[in-house]
Amino acid sequence: MSKDRIKHLIASRTDDDGLTETGIKGVRLFRATRAIPCAPVVYEPCVVAIVSGAKEAVFDGQRYVYDARQYLCCPMSMPVKAGTPTASPDNPLLGVFISLDPQALTTLAMQMETAGGVLPPGKSGLPAQGIKLARWDAAFGDALYRLLTLGTNRTDAAILGDARLREVHYALLKGEAGIFARQAFGPGNAIARSIAQVSARLDAPISIDDMAARAGMSRAVFHRKFKQATSMAPIQFVKSMRLNNAAMKISGGMTVNEAALDVGYVSPSQFSREFKRMFGQSPRHWSEAQQLPIGVR
């Protein structure tokens, strides 16, 4: 069974907690052997697949706990809280993190439709919202295993990595998360482009009117469609992205003032107020209490 082989492969290649590079761009293995409470992070477009233990993600108040039965699909950058609720030496968390390429997925989805409409059926008009858990199926497991076997040989990874990664993307689009991902990566998805622009330039001034204009929508229409896609109002989303990014930077050793400036705050007092309002304590107190293990969340 491919899932068991993947578990053995990850266990044999990850000696310490955290991330382990595979030699394939955007594909990393991870291990955790201790429980870590949820803390703010930003998930870039990704798939997270677990083969042992469980992970937890909280997005806009909704809690997602997933294990070897489901994988997480996050097709757009999203501010979440994440942790490892049950990891222990006897029950380690083992999994794979795969960065998604929006352009590659859009192209592949269009090719699939042209070739015969192999995308799974879905409810028309149902917008994607943040993240989704999808059932592992044989196609996804087999494609993932084939991808990870390349990690033992640099030449194989360099020559075959893109093709094997494409197989995983293909299995994703054919599986339970297919329609969800297709809505996010579909041609002309102005909301996805807006989120990508926000994620890339958090340090720059962000105007909702400018975001709406770039998307070719009125402010009211943009607000409605943005909330449909993310479950958050645009201004709430931008604030969450900035504060989650700042929290990660502080946990990584950056000073509070540096982190605030790095995500676009020019007023330290405003940053401190909004940080405390979101996370329940001041940035300085939070930085003393929090440690963010790389690769676990």
Image (cartoon, grey):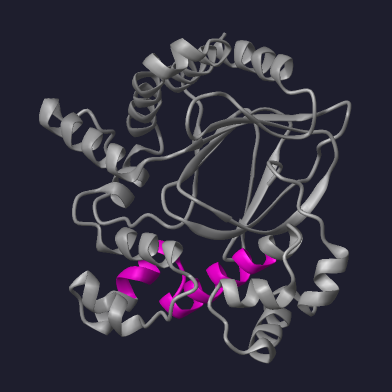
Q: How many marks?
A: 0
Coordinates of residue 9 in the picture (x, y in percent) = 65, 14
Give the quarter of the figure containing the N terminus: top right
Quadrant of residue 289 within the rendered picture: bottom right
Relative side of 88 to 80, left or right = right
Q: Is residue 241 magenta?
A: yes
Residue at the image position 36 percent from the left and 66 percent from the top: 228
**Which residue is found at the position 51% from the left and 26% from the top?**
136
Rendered position, 113 above or below 218: above
Work out whether residue 146 can be spotted. no
Expressed as whole percent of the image width and height from the top left, the position of residue 205 reads 43, 81
- Reply above or below: 192 against 7: below
The answer to which of 92 and 284 lies nearer the viewer is 284
Residue 150, image x and y in percent? 50, 13
Numbered range of the magenta stretch: 224-247
**Main SS of residues in magenta:** helix
Left or right for 255, reference 214: right
Note whether 208 is above or below 286 in the view shown.
Answer: below
Asked if residue 180 can be seen in this view, the reply is: yes
Q: Which of the pair 202/221 is nearer the observer?
A: 202
In the image, is residue 9 above or below residue 127?
above
Q: Any magenta on residue 229?
A: yes
Residue drawn at x 36%, y 46% is 180
Q: Which is nearer the eye, 134 or 169?
A: 169
- Residue shown at the point (45%, 11%) measured from the top left: 156
